[in-house]
């Protein structure tokens, strides 16, 4: 048979074959996830550098000459694990263990060696966990431990979000063809759209029961330009962005929530730009109930210079509130330690209470962190290390569930580097819901009042349809309805929580601002955020355990 005819028949088969579900594939779970370490050699060698996908340039390194040391990643949920791949720098581990934990406290050893020789260790493991760490007990050199990359693979998470997979190459195609010239796809190939408006991939999806489902499209876009798709579910269309992933062999997920009928459903992803759509690997379908929701604890203005021996000391009491929540992670909105946020003060006060959650805290600095006589943010940086500087900067972002979180340093909102980073970060986001947090609020009815330093950042977030902003600085609790950066009530605007009641002495309410819906002064507590696949709400829990305020439930933009 002539080769040209054979190729035509193969492509025709790809167009005519009906939809089929594939078995779950092993997925890379760890890249870009929150990471911590027992120590870092310096700020440029933080823990996050071992989970950024760069196998030759960036790396994590521990302090030199010390055992044991560890490097840990938070996968976001307990997940079946299949493989861990370590790419060592010259400073390797001779004796180390791969351990997993569901809570970050009790660890199970999945692999152990006392004869490591550096290079690349590709290790098959069996077990499950949310937290995975390399625990080194004997160095192979006189230096420390140093990893270019630690990659954790398993079933579930990004690349396999927990339901049946419908391969794109098995779907009905129009103005698109099956290809296999880029690595990383999960089936026998992927779909390459023609560079035109109107090409589509269409699946017939079966749901056991009617209701909300998460539809996750795995894609690659090796350009810097967005390649949007109109995703129609039984004729109801949602437009979604598919921004660049850095390379055609780098795959990412975009998830939307839709209502499916019991039985057969039609899902069509149509290119809406002249450049066509991204390369599409597969569609994963899973019920949206339950598993996509999680709890986050949040507060700012926390540790006064006092201890639990004083009944008027509040940060031990707010720490107890956090413990009772058992949150996925903890957000702090600055002024973590008073008065000058020196390292010795962090150690003497904050660490004795809120330090219990340090490994799962995602902090930002406030103005008091800049007062340290040792230098602006010196104590803050020394105490939190790579937790607060995962990329060597005082601002960062991370994902959890269908949420994208942006942690910002409002002491440096006048610096273009952070502003440019924020724009690029939001442009690359693929999650439906966006929350940002920093110290100085744009809107406040308290003694400090509105701080215009935050207006340009609000505008950037507003333009990108962000959903939620959390701030501190004024020592009270306040919630605002959705509004624009110019304080106009707007259903497409951002909801703000001011949560400066973590333990510092309270401030008065002085000038009630437009769109302010609830204000409490003198009430210490913690915000309990309930974050779903496409909705969010919260409660303020007081130090007496009582609910002091309950928000409406909002739908993400």
Image (cartoon, rainbow, N blue to C red):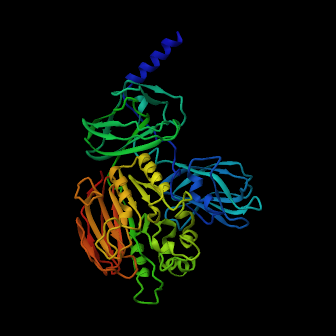
Q: Is residue 135 above or below residue 324?
A: above
Q: Nearer the viewer, residue 430 or 203?
A: 430
Q: Residue at x 43, y 67 (%)?
A: 330
Q: Nearer the viewer, residue 499 or 6?
A: 499
Q: Quadrant of residue 226?
A: top left
Residue 69 visible in the shown view? yes
The residue at the far right in this view is 142
Q: Position of residue 537 (x, y in %)?
A: 29, 62
Q: Is residue 370 above or below residue 19?
A: below
Q: Is residue 182 left or right of residue 460?
A: right
Q: Position of residue 93 (x, y in %)?
A: 71, 58
Q: Residue at x 39, y 72 (%)?
A: 473
Residue 77 visible in the shown view? no
The residue at the far bottom in this view is 310
Count up the numbered dots: 0
Q: Is residue 16 above or below residue 66?
A: above
Q: Position of residue 535 (x, y in %)?
A: 30, 56
Q: Position of residue 303 (x, y in %)?
A: 45, 79
């Amino acid at each position: 048979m002539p080769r040209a005819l054979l190729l035509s028949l193969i492509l025709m088969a790809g167009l005519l074959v009906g939809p089929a579900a594939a078995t779950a594939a092993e997925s890379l779970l760890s890249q870009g996830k929150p990471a911590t370490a027992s120590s870092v050699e310096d700020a440029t060698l933080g823990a996050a550098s071992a989970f950024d996908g760069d196998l030759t340039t960036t790396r994590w390194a521990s302090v030199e000459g010390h055992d044991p040391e560890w490097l840990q990643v938070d996968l976001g949920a307990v997940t079946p694990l299949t493989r861990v791949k370590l790419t060592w720098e010259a400073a390797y581990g001779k004796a180390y263990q791969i351990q997993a934990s569901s809570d970050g406290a009790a660890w199970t050893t999945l692999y152990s060696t006392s004869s490591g020789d550096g290079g690349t260790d590709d290790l098959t493991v069996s077990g499950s966990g949310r937290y995975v760490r390399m625990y080194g007990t004997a160095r192979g050199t006189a230096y420390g431990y140093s990893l270019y990359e630690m990659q954790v693979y398993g079933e579930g998470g990004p690349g396999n979000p927990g339901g049946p997979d419908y391969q794109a190459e098995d779907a009905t195609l129009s103005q698109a063809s099956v290809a296999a010239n880029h690595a990383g796809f999960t089936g026998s190939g992927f779909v390459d759209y023609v560079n035109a408006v109107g090409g589509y991939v269409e699946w017939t999806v079966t749901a056991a029961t009617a209701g909300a489902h998460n539809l996750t499209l795995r894609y690659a876009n090796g350009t810097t330009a967005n390649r949007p798709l109109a995703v129609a579910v039984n004729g109801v269309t949602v437009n979604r962005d598919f921004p660049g992933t850095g390379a055609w062999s780098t795959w990412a997920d975009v998830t939307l929530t839709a209502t499916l009928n019991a039985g057969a459903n039609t899902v069509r992803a149509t290119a809406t730009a002249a450049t066509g759509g991204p390369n599409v690997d597969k569609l994963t379908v899973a019920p949206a109930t339950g598993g996509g929701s999680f709890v986050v604890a949040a507060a700012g203005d926390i540790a006064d210079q006092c201890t639990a021996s004083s009944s008027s000391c509040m940060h031990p009491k707010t720490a107890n509130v956090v413990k009772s929540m058992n949150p996925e992670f903890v957000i702090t909105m600055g002024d973590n330690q008073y008065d000058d946020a020196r390292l010795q003060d962090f150690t003497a006060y904050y660490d004795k209470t809120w330090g219990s959650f340090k490994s799962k805290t995602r902090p930002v600095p406030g103005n008091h962190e800049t007062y340290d006589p040792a230098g602006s943010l010196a104590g803050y940086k020394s105490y939190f290390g790579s937790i607060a500087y995962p990329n060597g900067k005082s601002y960062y972002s991370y994902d959890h569930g269908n949420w994208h979180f942006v942690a910002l340093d409002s002491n440096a909102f006048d610096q273009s580097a952070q502003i440019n980073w924020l724009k690029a970060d939001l442009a690359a986001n693929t999650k439906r819901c966006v929350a940002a947090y920093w110290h100085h609020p744009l809107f406040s009815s308290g003694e400090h009042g509105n701080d215009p330093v935050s207006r340009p950042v609000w505008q950037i977030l507003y333009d990108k349809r962000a959903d939620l902003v959390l701030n501190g600085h004024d020592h009270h609790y306040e919630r605002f309805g959705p509004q624009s950066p110019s304080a106009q009530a707007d259903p497409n605007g951002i909801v703000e929580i001011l949560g400066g009641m973590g333990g510092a002495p309270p401030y008065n309410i002085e000038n009630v601002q437009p769109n302010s819906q609830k204000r409490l002064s003198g009430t210490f507590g913690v915000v309990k955020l309930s974050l779903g696949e496409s909705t969010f709400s919260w409660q303020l829990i007081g130090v007496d355990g009582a609910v002091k305020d309950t928000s409406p439930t909002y739908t993400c933009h």
